[in-house]
Image (spheres, grey):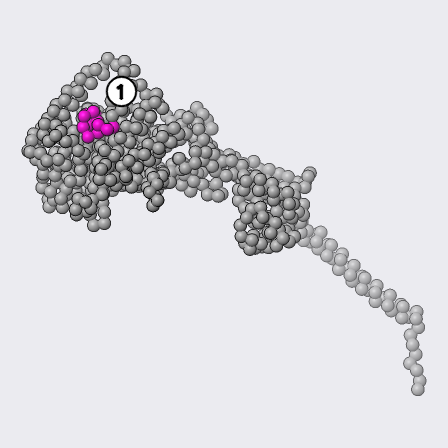
Amino acid sequence: MKKKPQASPLKSFFRRSIFFGLVMILVSGGLVWRLVYFQILDSERYIAHGASQRMKTEKVFAQRGSILDRHGVDLAVSVPRRSLVADARLVEDPVLTAKALIQIIGGDLEELEKKLSSGKRFVYLARQVEDRFADAVLSLKLSGVYTQKEQSRVRPDGDSVLAIVGRTDIDGKGISGLEKSHDAYLAGENGLKIVERGPRGSTIPGGEYSLEAAENGETIVSTLDRSLQFQAEKILISGVDKAEAKGGLLVAMRPSTGEILASVAVERNPDGVTQQVSEHRSATWTFEPGSIIKPLTFSAVMDAGVASIDSVRKVEDEIHVHDSDFSDWFDHEEAEWSVSEILYRSSNVGTILWAQEIGASLLHNKLQKFGLGRKSELNFPGEANGILLPVEKWSGTSLPTIAIGQGVSVTPLQMLTAYATLANRGLKPAPTLIRSMGNNVDMTFESLKTQPERIIESQTADSLVQIIETVVSSGTGRNAQVPGYRVAGKTGTAWKPQLGGYGEEKEDRRYVVSFAGFFPVDDPEIVALVVVDEPSSNADSGGKAAAPIFADFAKFAVRQLRIPSENEKIDPTSSERVLAITSIQAGLLNSFSSELPNNRFDEEVAGSLVE
């Protein structure tokens, strides 16, 4: 058998060389093509990809503006904090990293592992931690884990002013109170920082860097007085506890400017402890005011020219209107009483008789001018309108009911502003919580306030003030007296609406009691309203439960604000006014005390109506 001739070794080597040569040419060509593609044809994409791995864009958070009290004391400020964050793409071992972190920052191990395994460029591990925790984590030198500077909002006084100042969320955005209503002003504008980082996330010294600076927020100086606010809380809690009440409220204003100096609301929790609530109820809560509305009713009567302070008419102890009977809070025979006596005695029947003289439209218009039934100029988040129905929706008993403070719902702020109007002798101020805004310390409240509006004639207001001063000096408001100071004010007791009405039987009824007043009478520095919600039967009147709280607050306020007493004033014209008021007091007190057995002088029940 003939053998097949074999190729020579030289030819075989030559063929293999050609094959490997072609392979090398193809491989080299491929590499060259990839280099050309990466560096020329699609270079921008890969340059950007590389830069994205090295270059980090971070927010530079603006410093949120502070909120201060009227004396420059911090109420809400931002302090530096660090948050723990991670670039999950750079984390080498998510499980071990999570176990190391959990020992320091706590939390859920499974959730932390999930974040570190997500592959995301940016994940929060823990927000705004204390420096000792942040430093402890950084000392571990975990790949992909680093810190980011942030701002944390704190209130140095705790929750004392929380209801007004409000809260921010974890990202520093205002969600309630002044923090929300002035968020854009306080927040400022964030900036941007671009830095070059190494594989482990650390900044490369000498690497690329650029910064767009943040624009910090502006400072707000509020009208609040921190000392008055703190003391108001203590006094109110004590007063509510003494009255064994469900809750209470105290709000004070400077009547000439409308500046709110203090505003506190408290409530008894299920454990029986009375504590401040986080809701600014002076603006958001409503109640039926009872007899504190009567000076407003008589302002409409007197401004209409229907009656003067000395106008007299016969008043019985009960009156029938439409389908209801309305009675006074004390028994008496038919008598001829002046407007002064009716208001001083807080006679429901007398008030209704005069309200009928002016009619529904005039009464509604006057109450509306005082600000009832609509939001105030305060512009506070969640502020309530109250309820003052249009005249066309009034029923047959609306006029008598509203005239004595039932069937109408008001916010404490609305009633406070109404009494500030009386204190200003008819000029209604615009309530405000802002004294100045911005870093310009020379900017004052004068540039922000709304000009006061005349609501009632000055002569009418002056007459009403004289009458309600006697209420404090010798009437139902005697517990609101402040030694050395002339105080004017009015007590109120109203039935509290319940499901299905006010309660059929007396023992089923609940009350809201109040006192509204101001001092010193000639040049008022403070107007305040105290409301006590559902006091016990031993303190179920404005004179017993609310007036003492007003007096305790006023005694502190005159010291805090250095308001001179009557003895410290030198006013040659004041003696004539004191004599006139003393004459009114003597006449009213003598006529009234003679009609009450054993000089009984209990508080009125403003809504003493029988359906």
Q: Name the residue rendered at 16%, 45% in the picture.
A: 395
Q: In the displayed structure, would residue 147 be above or below residue 449?
A: below
Please state which of residues 319 and 275 is positioned toward the viewer in this rendering: 275
Confirm whether residue 427 shows in the render: no
Q: Residues within 10 Å of mark 1 (few under 14, many from 20)?
A: few
Q: Is residue 89 left or right of residue 127?
A: right
Let me know if residue 135 is in the magenta part: no
Q: In this view, does 528 lie to the left or right of 33?
A: left
Q: What residue type is labelled 1?
A: Gly
Confirm whether residue 573 shows in the render: yes
Q: Name the residue rendered at 23%, 36% in the picture.
A: 539
Q: In this view, does 390 lie to the left or right of 238?
A: left
Point out the image quarter for the N terminus.
Answer: bottom right
Q: In the displayed structure, would residue 550 be above or below residue 192?
A: above
Let me know if residue 475 is in the magenta part: yes
Determine the image quadrant of residue 165: top left
Picture coordinates of residue 151 (x, y %)?
52, 38
Residue at mark 1: 484
In the image, the segment drawn in magenta is 468-480
Q: Is mark 1 on a helix, strand or loop?
A: loop
Determine the image quadrant of residue 346: top left
Q: Give the dominant element type of the magenta stretch: helix, strand or loop.
A: helix
Image label count: 1
Q: Name the residue rendered at 22%, 32% in the picture.
A: 543
Picture coordinates of residue 11 (x, y %)?
91, 70
Q: Name the residue rendered at 27%, 27% in the picture.
A: 518
Determine the image quadrant of residue 610: top left
Picture coordinates of residue 131 (x, y %)?
57, 39
